[in-house]
Amino acid sequence: MKSVMPDMQPMNQTVQETPVFEVLSEDQIEQIYFSALEVLERVGSRVHHDDALELFRNSGDAVVGDDKRVRVTTSLVERALKNYPRKITLKGRNGIRSVALQKDHVYFGTGSDLPFTYDRKTGERRRTTYKDIVDAGRIVDYLPNFDFFMSHGIVGDAPNPLTYDRHQFMAMLEGCTKPYVVTSVDGEGLEDLWKMACLFQGGEDEFRLNPMFVAYIEPISPLTNDRTAVEKLLFAAEKGIPAMYTPCPSSGATAPATIAGMLVQSLAETLLAIALCHLKRPGMPLIMGGVTTVMDMRTTTYSYGAPEMALASAANTDISKWLNLIMFSTGGCSDAKVLDEQAAIESTISNLTAFLSGANLVHDVGYIDSGVNASLESLVMNDEIIAMVRQVGKGIKTDEAHLALKVIDEVGPGGEFVTHDHTYEHWKEWFMPKLMDRSDWETWNAEGAKTMLDRVNEETQRILDTHEPAPIDDTIKKELKKIIDDADKRHSK
Amino acid sequence: MAVDLGQMAELLIAGKVDEVEKMTGQAIEEGMDPSDILQKGLIAGMDVVGQRFKACDMFIPEVLRSAKAMGAGMKQLRPMLVASGAKMAGTMVIGTVKGDLHDIGKNLVGMMFEGAGFQVVNLGIDLESQVFVDAVKEHKPELLGMSALLTTTMPKMGEVINALKEAGIRDQVKVMVGGAPVTEEFAKEIGADIYGANAASSVDKAKAVLNA
């Protein structure tokens, strides 16, 4: 006779279903935070923007030096920190509010502005074109594990470098319907991109509730804020456009050679923007960032594959959560010159670490050649890596159905589970490989003995041959063209 | 109302074991031609299952459900098909050799063959060579399948083949071997007819050899 199974519902237990991953303790975070405040009070940060300097001067909470160095009180920073939104939800031109930036929600996307592209036909490295960006967009639009799109490449064939950003955004709109992170030449460029996006979202107010993109803005490490960066930041604050201010220090060159020192400095750089945006307009949707890595001491390369990058990025995410800020992080990128084993190894480590840390926007997926060369194949390979990483993140369910005591009892010693209803009901919870090969030796040989790279290439070509994103409405297209043409005219004089 | 064989095929694809079994019974009661029930109902469904499996649209747990439905239908049809002299996939005897307690892989292969319309006699595990010889004599199968999952028990498969030769019945049956450490070369070395690399491809290979 079958035994009766015990009641499996626990009481008063904390059931942890997903992995817990932290690289800093709360005490360490506080040490870093207080150190960053000390940097802002004692060292300050240089701001090359007159309006911004005026805002600081009038605040009563900052001292502006003759060398444009701004020192800020802790009081201002802490008041500012209380006012930033903890949730920003992005809505793509596909009409879906698909990217809900909030604690521990992780989204993956490309990086931007790579000057070169790996040419699939010739195997050469060449200048990136408009079409390359449309193609990257189509691939991101198709791949299920990509949630947002940055341009991947920089439009090298735009008519004027001062307006390239409008053309680049147009290519992004054409190729991809998911939300974006955009780069712009200056404040005026960001304004045009924002106007273009408002056409889709139904105007300025709707954009505030349903932002289509986050503006990418970066200071210059160490502790320097150039005019265009501040211009963009102030415009974003004024209009309520989500923006990130993301320091890109290289440890040992533009930041201390210790990870903790780099974290202190980059947090000080972020906190300055936090204070400035608060003075401009409290509560603007500002996102914390940081591409924190090391300079390679043999080559001076800013490394995109260093384990220190993954570690420091995870630390930044720990800090961001403690500060209640949304985090823009980095993963899926590599120093390898072509898509090879090195690219796979480096991409995997940074993707996994970023995911487990709970970073919100993980960008630069698909970068090769240390942020110089764009590879469509790398996007396709990373899609599989991210799918595996997400599976690890799902953790382990331990409810009654998943503990499966009843099933173990029914099958018993020497039985089999493969035909059991329980298997039929639960096996689909597993990761289902698309590119990873698990066939036997004979089948693998019979199917052409293809390597991972062969399969990645085939899948890339298949997507390019078959996937077309939803077209842009003709009326909107005309208005987009007008914004771009006007910009080109203004800058041709 | 006449039984809809197309619907039977659909139910089989969906892995509805009880419904396929019931429908086969109804079709027989209505006096439908057993060959028609087999070809237009069960095999038509399994053909689609096979295609979808190869295209990665169906997976092992689903295929095995369909195979189970096929087996349930065949159980009722077989006596009638035998009586009418209709062409059938045949009989397979399968087992794991002496010293090896591995059961599931071999059972999976058996289920796949049931799905292909074979009558499968599963002898079990840890079997003496003589058990295989006796089973071939008794069931007169077209196919004998043997499995070993250990490098230490692999040679036992060769011993079974030798025992079949000694009993003078080696020519009466095609021998198929498989299991993780087994290779095509090893299969040839011990004089097996078919090497089954995995459960699904074994069926195709066996069919090709039996139909040759």
Image: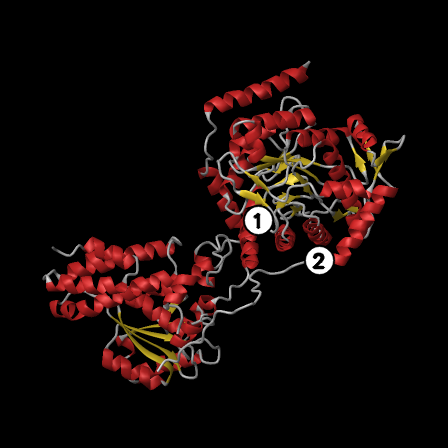
At 54% across and 48% down in the image, what residue appears? Answer: A383
The C terminus of chain A sits in image quarter: top right
Secondary element at tag 2: loop
Q: Please provide percent x and percent y for residue A314.
A: 69, 53
Q: Which residue is mark 1?
A: A382
Q: Please provide percent x and percent y for residue A222.
A: 81, 40
Residue with the most extreme top position: A493
The first of marks 1 and 2 along the sequence is 2
Residue with the most extreme left position: B31
In the displayed structure, A45 sits above or below A359; it is above
At 48% across and 41% down in the image, what residue appears? Answer: A463
The residues tagged by marks 1 and 2 sit, at their Cα atoms, a distance apart of 24 Å
Q: Please provide percent x and percent y for residue B39.
A: 20, 58
Q: Which residue is mark 2?
A: A23
Residue B136: which quarter of the image? bottom left
What kind of residue is marked 2? Answer: Val
What kind of residue is marked 1? Answer: Asn
